[in-house]
């Protein structure tokens, strides 16, 4: 049985699509192993996939670094990202070595946006590598780099190359040192992904062209597959209090959640949300990830949850208010719900703008710009018929797609060849 090893990391929204892909690859007869941080071990094993731990990186711990969290709270996303890179320098060697060793025994390696270590292992073992992305991070003149959504159009193509080379620059020195001293591979003279595309290899993009169409300047080697979704993650037995809250007053609540994003003052944010709900005459399910919620109590308007399957919850809510990570955007669209994106960093504003342009919700707005009155207004906007109609139409279109099957079949072709 051929072994496929998937090298992934990041937030749950970054990792879960690869679990979905792994499930599909296993269905068609492959032995699938996922390399990911320990926090995702139980999730991977829940679906009977192989697991190898990536010890060097813990996404939750990195987001809790005080200096990084302080930059987030100031709204300085660039500063936060630069600090993350600086703080990561001490673990880069360990990360690369782990990524490399975790690929041992693979017949095919699947990499994500940062392929280093895993791609070197594939090169050393002389096995195929398939590069995959959750975002349109391939140079094009028609879409900006996802972390720079407001730049002039003439900079679009350059912005993609800048991001790719920026990541490569962070790893380059240690990467070439390991390639020379431990892996006995030739020195890299350019970013590996540039060479990967120049050699005519396939890049799989795990989102739907219903949301973002394929640029005309991409080749047939850039394949937009559709979203990668765990279709059977709907078995969930809610606490009685949650079930009661969902059905209270014969009116669905909203979902408000900011993924793994840190909040400067949790109690102040919850107070603002509660006041906005009071003004709007609405209720909400609230998810605050690892933020300290010890002093946050349930009320008639707010029910605070821990981790809960979006595929189970979102069909049961009126609309979603999210940070704009691609995983939560995907879940909202599949459930056919209007969306308000409150972006914090990275690609979140980019995806929020795509949803706004598709007419499924208002324009993205930063948390620091919201007060209770404005937030209440935005919540009520989500009830507009046009948003409801467009969200349901996109959900209908997405229901006919099977992104993991398209991706799995393409990977199967690559292994055969």
Image (cartoon, helix red, strand yellow):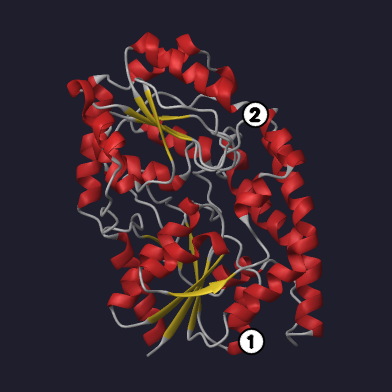
Residue at figure coordinates x 34%, y 45% from the top left: 310
Residue at figure coordinates x 35%, y 68% from the top left: 47
- Figure quadrant of the N terminus: bottom left
Q: Residue 402, relative to residue 295: is it above or below?
A: below
Residue 365 pos. (x, y %): 51, 24
* Disc on res. 64: none
Return the residue nearer the eye: 321 or 360: 321
Q: Quadrant of residue 58?
A: bottom right
Q: Quadrant of residue 377?
A: top left
Return the residue nearer the eye: 50 or 382: 50
Residue 265 pos. (x, y %): 62, 26
Q: Residue 249, relative to residue 161: is it above or below?
A: above
Position of 97 compared to 366: left or right? right
Crowd tier of the residue under label 1, counting other residues whose Cα lies within 10 Å: few below 14, some 14–19, many 20 or above: some
Residue 74 pos. (x, y %): 70, 27
The answer to the question of whether label 1 and label 2 lie on touching residues, with beta carbons closer than 8 A, is: no
- Figure quadrant of the C terminus: bottom left
The residue at which mark 1 appears reads as 124
The residue at which mark 2 appears reads as 264
**C-alpha separation, residue under disc 1 versus residue under disc 2:** 45 Å
Return the residue nearer the eye: 189 or 233: 233
Of pointers 1 and 2, the one earlier in the residue sequence: 1
Residue 85 pos. (x, y %): 74, 52
Position of 234 compared to 207: left or right? left
Position of 84 compared to 405: left or right? right
Q: Secondary structure at mark 2?
A: loop
Q: Nearer the viewer, mark 1 or mark 2?
A: 2
Residue at figure coordinates x 46%, y 20% from the top left: 273
């Amino acid at each position: 049985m051929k072994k496929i090893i998937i090298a992934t990391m990041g937030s749950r929204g970054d990792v879960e699509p690869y679990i979905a892909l792994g499930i599909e690859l296993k269905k068609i007869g492959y032995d699938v192993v996922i390399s990911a941080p320990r926090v995702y071990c139980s999730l991977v094993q829940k679906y009977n996939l192989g697991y190898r731990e990536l010890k060097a990186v813990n996404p939750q711990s990195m987001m809790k670094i005080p200096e990084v969290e302080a930059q987030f709270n100031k709204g300085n996303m660039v500063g936060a990202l630069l600090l993350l890179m600086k703080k990561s320098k001490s673990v880069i060697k360990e990360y690369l070595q782990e990524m490399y060793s975790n690929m041992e025994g693979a017949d095919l390696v699947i990499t994500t946006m940062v392929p280093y270590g895993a791609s070197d292992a594939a090169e050393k073992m002389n096995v195929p590598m398939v590069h995959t992305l959750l975002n349109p991070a391939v140079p094009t003149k028609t879409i900006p780099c996802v972390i720079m959504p407001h730049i002039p159009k003439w900079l679009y193509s350059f912005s993609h190359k800048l991001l790719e080379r920026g990541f490569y620059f962070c790893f380059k020195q240690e990467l070439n040192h390991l390639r020379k001293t431990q892996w006995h591979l030739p020195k890299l003279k350019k970013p590996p992904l540039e060479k990967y595309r120049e050699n005519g290899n396939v890049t799989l993009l795990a989102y739907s062209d219903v949301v973002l169409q394929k640029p005309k300047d991409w080749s047939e080697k850039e394949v937009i597959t559709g979203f990668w979704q765990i279709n059977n993650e709907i078995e969930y037995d809610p606490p009685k209090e949650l079930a009661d809250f969902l059905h209270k007053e014969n009116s669905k609540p909203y979902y408000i959640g900011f993924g793994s994003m840190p909040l400067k003052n949790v109690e102040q944010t919850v107070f603002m949300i509660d006041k906005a709900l009071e003004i709007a005459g609405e209720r909400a399910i609230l998810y605050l990830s690892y933020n300290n919620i010890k002093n946050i109590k349930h009320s008639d308007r707010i029910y605070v949850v821990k981790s809960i399957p979006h595929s189970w919850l979102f069909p049961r809510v009126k609309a979603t208010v999210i940070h704009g990570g691609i995983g939560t955007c995907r879940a909202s669209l599949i459930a056919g719900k209007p969306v308000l994106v409150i972006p914090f960093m990275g690609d979140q504003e980019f995806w929020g703008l795509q949803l706004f342009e598709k007419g499924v919700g208002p324009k993205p707005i930063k948390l620091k710009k919201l007060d209770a009155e404005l937030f209440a207004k935005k919540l009520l906007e989500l009830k507009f018929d046009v948003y409801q109609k467009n969200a349901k139409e996109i959900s209908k279109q997405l229901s006919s797609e099977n992104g993991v099957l398209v991706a799995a079949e393409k990977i199967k072709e690559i292994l055969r060849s």
